[in-house]
Amino acid sequence: MITISVEDLWKSYKDKEVLKGISFTVNDGEIFSLLGPNGAGKTTTIKILSCVSKPDRGKIEILGMKVPEDCEKIRRIIGIVPQDFQGFSDLTVKDNIEYFANIYGGDKSQVNEVIEELDLEDYKNTRFKKLSGGLKRRVAIACALVGNPRIIYLDEPTVGLDPKARRNVWDIMKKLKDKKLTILLTTHYLDEAQKLSDRIAIIYSGKILRLSTPDDLMKEFEKPTLEEAYLALLESISEE
């Protein structure tokens, strides 16, 4: 079953075309990763799919609902973890999660559930500003989950984290997939994409260069890792 369908999506800011007719689908319950350098259009795509920005043109459907026409309904079924999630510094972990529960229509039992699920019980009464980077990221994910979304968008969820904290976030993503959530991930870490993704889309200068699985791209360029295959793809584009 197709959860997200994007067809011929265009977006410009001022005089710059950020997205130039990209198309892809995301299947129910999979981890789909958008890969590409800074400025390629990954975050812009997430913003449009989460109804933060409007597309210039293109056809977008999320569980049969259209963007931007049905954005009010779409917001009820998605959870968003933005790259720049800050949280409320002087509120506790639990208070932060409760705030987002009120926004997303979650209840007290859901707040307690996500605190337990993301191993935040020992920190629930700690102020957000006192947390480590890895714990802040877990709180961000908890805030996105508290309304029981069908789809979750993770924009660079492990950027700046140490290796242990990154692995903790990986484990969380695997648990979310086991719960049949559909995950759209953007990441600069190719080992992360190789480890977690069912399928990938590589965006470069606002266009999709490849829609593939990590294994298929590695086979195409005869490389042992996704990172090496990715670099080989970009090198082949620069030579054209």
Image: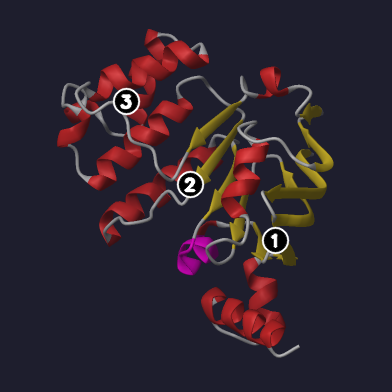
Residue 83, image x and y in percent? 43, 45
Disc 2 designates what residue? 174
Q: Residue at point 69% right, 54% down?
A: 15
**Residue drawn at 83 percent across, 42 percent down:** 57
Q: Does the magenta stretch include residue 50?
A: no
Magenta-colored span: 188-195
In this view, the residue farthest toward the bottom is 239
Quarter occupied by residue 160: bottom left
Task: Give the mark toward the camera: 3 or 1.
Answer: 1
Kindly identify which numbered label has been placed on residue 115: 3
- The type of residue carrying mark 3 is Ile
Q: Residue 206 carries which label?
A: 1
Q: Quadrant of the N terminus?
A: top right
Could you say where residue 113 lies in the image, as x and y percent from the top left?
38, 20
Mark pair 2, 3: CA separation = 17 Å
- Disc 2 crowd rating (10 Å Cα; few below 14, some 14-19, many 20+) is some
Q: Is mark 2 on a helix, strand or loop?
A: helix
> Predominant secondary structure in magenta?
helix
Name the N-terminal-most of marks 3 and 1: 3
